[in-house]
Amino acid sequence: MASTTISYTTLCFLLELNQTKQNLSSSSCSLLKVNQARNQLCFTSIHLGKANSILVVKASKAAAQAAKEGEEEEDKYEEYEVEIVQPYGLKFTKGRDGGTYIDAIAPGGFADQTGKFTVGDKVLSTSAVFGEEIWPAAEYGRTMYTIRQRIGPLLMKMQKRYGKVEEAGELTEKEIIRAERNAGFISDRVREIQMTNARRKKEQKEQREKDLRQGLQLSKNAKYEEALEKFESVLGSRPTGNEAAVASYNVACCYSKLNQLQAGLSALEDALEAGFEDFKRIRTDPDLANLRTSEDFETLMKKCDESFINENAINAIKSLFGFNKK
């Protein structure tokens, strides 16, 4: 075999060249891996970008759908008009939104006979106190003032709520408690509702007391129409029996001062039904002087004043047996 002589310089060059090739090979693999990773990252980024876009689109569609459903929810409450005459046979309540809602319908009354009203329906507008003008339903007290004082048939534009006043579809406290009792537990949601309701009742009571004080002051200053709004607001906020009796009595006094006899007698009857029993005051109160000129006043008093009825009965018996003779 022939021997090959390689100089030291050449050997060093060859060794360096081989090392360079290995480094290049290693670098190529690293670059390839980096490239692959970068491509994968780009692909992932593009994929996630598409996914995020899809989610955004879906979220937008969901929001639009929810808004549409909300509009449809509101739109489903159809409106109707009906003309009624006194006695209407309707009892109203004040909603959380300050609006006027039907709280009860007297069986056999004029409103009941129309077949159009249902409990929970909202008053949108009514006839003005007199004439053909239509007034939009404002704050509860003003709306009740208009309804009570209306001269002639009352045209009402209503929104049918199918018994739904202002809870916006939420379950009532009783419904939630019943459902959770059936499930065997009471959640924090129920406790939260109970606390909210207790707070709301306290706030409503404070507001009723405030309205009553303001109404009395306005009445004292002969601002009877403004006073009526305050007293009617008390009556529309589910007052206690005593609050209802006092407020209704003062409503009667205001209408009497305004010489609105029919409205005044109606309010006085409400006061008596709510438990107002100071008959002596009713018969002597200067604020009710105009009401006492009406023939219907005595009819109402004879129907409600048991002491008056009993006194007449006793006097009749005394006369029968000659006890009244001198």
Image: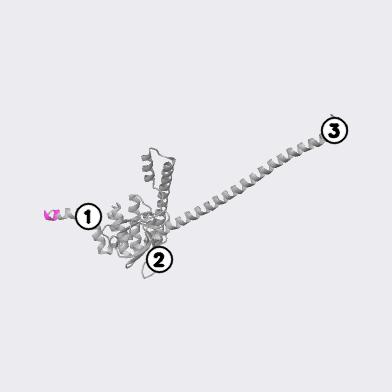
Identify residue type, mark 1.
Phe
Of the 4 image quadrants, the one containing the N terminus is top right
Q: How far apart are marks 3 and 2 (CA)?
A: 111 Å
Which stretch appears magenta?
A: 317-321
First-in-chain label (3 vs 2): 3
* Front position in the image: 29 or 293: 29
Q: Is 22 left, or right, of 97 in this rendering?
A: right
Residue under label 3: 11
Furthest residue toward front:
1
Q: Is residue 320 magenta?
A: yes
Q: Residue at x 34, y 53 (%)?
A: 244
Residue 276: where, in percent of width, then height?
A: 30, 53
Residue 76: where, in percent of width, then height?
A: 40, 58
Name the mark on residue 104. none
Identify residue type, mark 2.
Trp
Identify residue type, mark 3.
Leu
Secondary element at image label 3: helix
Residue under label 2: 135
Q: Residue at x 25, y 62 (%)?
A: 296
Relative to residue 171, is residue 30 depicted above or below?
above
Name the mark on residue 308. 1
